[in-house]
Amino acid sequence: MAATLTGNALGEAQVVREVEITGNTRTKAEVIRRELLFEPGDTLTVDLIEETERNLRAFLFLGDVELGMTQEGNWVDVLIRVRDLYARAITPLLSGEPDELSYGAVGLDYNFLGRGQILEVTAEHDPITGDRARVFYRAPRLSGSRLRLDLDGEISSDGHHASIAVARPFFRLAECWSVGASVLNQESVVRLNSGESLAEQYDVRTWSATASVRRSYGEDVKARTGVFLAISDRSFEPETGFTYAPADRRRVLPSLGLTVWRPQYDTTRFLRRLGRKEDVQTGSWATVRVGASLEAIGSDRDYQFFTMDLNPRLKSGNRAYLFSRFTLRGRMSQGRIWNVFGSAEAMGIVKIRETHSFAARARYDGLGRTEDATQYLLGTARGLRGYALRRFDGSRRLIFNVEARPTLLRRRDYTLAGVVFVDGGSAWTPGQGGQVFAIAVGIGGRVGLTRVYNSPILRADVGYGFEDRAWVLYMGLGQYF
């Protein structure tokens, strides 16, 4: 006699007899089947079920994913129920301020030919960088293998971009090896601001290639070691009317890396999205990477470099989350540290009932003794709504954001939500004076399209900047932070 089971009720010797997939109207069954971490004849465990569900939910073109099980003796039949989302669309692009809007359209298919492939064609106009056209293609399982292929090409007023990448990522927690390689050719323009005015502008031409091999150890706590090689050749030239450009360079950068993390997940809704089931990584991790640039193997100069990245994550009860990150990277040569970049960020989210939340973020960024002239911008697009896009700039940046996020209306095809926010921040360069800490308040709306690929969120915010005494409208996709 057959009995229906939940994942938690599995016995220790349940062997898979059959796997049935239902609900897929466009997605081919083999696309779903190849993500399963079990097949007929395997012993089924709770961990395999949970990880398989996460793998399937990671598909942007699948909505609800449920695994049901029916037991008969030591055998278990698995029923996988999915729901295809609308994965083909022509979507308008609109972001920025009314007098400085970026606009365009993207035609996309996140489930190309029903095989889980991604195809995007984008045409966009930006008031600063001009026009661009881009084509992106991804085959997550090239010819049914575990290889992933990415092709990316773009032509714009600023130049072009063409890249190809092939990788075999860790497709399950128990996977031991990951490899990858990529090649890039790019021409672009870098712009530096002073106040809200353009100060310098130069062209960058880049050829680069990367390769990596990583090995994973452990179960409850993972240790992933890696060997990396990056090769690049970059040339710089100031544009007409400007004088600054960095020195040309060629770099050959071998490095070693170590990541230690705890693979721990929490499945919830209405945390960062508007209704879609989310797999939130609540396990903390840390990464260290060290390497060298060596003239002996082709670089234009000798130095050592390092990156340290710490990501503590905490969960309190069933409703409060804290996501934080501390990053430091730099270079060392002749006893001094230079090209230093550092950041620290903490973001907390508290769920209120089932569909509302309160979110807050604080972030600090700093740089010093850099190889190239560079800067942080602060404005509507950079963490401070209610001010122009490039209102403040400097080598230091401080941001805080507070949002109340009520969910107003839920329907089968969409969700309406709102925000009430307070933003604050400052960008400055030590020793140059003129530091201003600016405050803005405002309200906004969110529309979550729950039946569309990736359940996108359309965003519109109106902020009032007290420093400039002006209202600024800003639109985009996704939550603001």
Image (tube, rainbow, N blue to C red):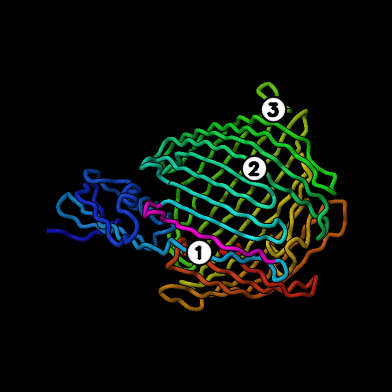
Judge from the rendering whether residue 430 lies leftward or rightward of residue 88; answer left or right: right
Question: Where is residue 469 drawn, in percent x and y?
Answer: 79, 75
Amino acid on which disc 1 is placed: Ile
Gap between marks 1 and 2 measured at Cα: 27 Å
Is 239 in front, or is 286?
239
Three-letter residue code for mark 3:
Ser
- Label 2 with label 3: CB-CB less than 8 Å: no
Magenta residues: mostly which secondary structure?
strand
Q: Nearer the viewer, residue 131 or 212?
A: 131
Q: Which residue is mark 3?
A: 299
Q: Residues within 10 Å of mark 3 (few under 14, many from 20)?
A: some
- The disc at residue 411 is none
Q: Secondary structure at mark 2?
A: strand
CA distance for labels 1 and 3: 45 Å
Q: Residues within 10 Å of mark 1 (few under 14, many from 20)?
A: few
Give the residue number, with chain letter if any, for mark 2. Answer: 186
The residue depicted at 76 percent of the width and 37 percent of the height is 338
Give the magenta range: 101-116
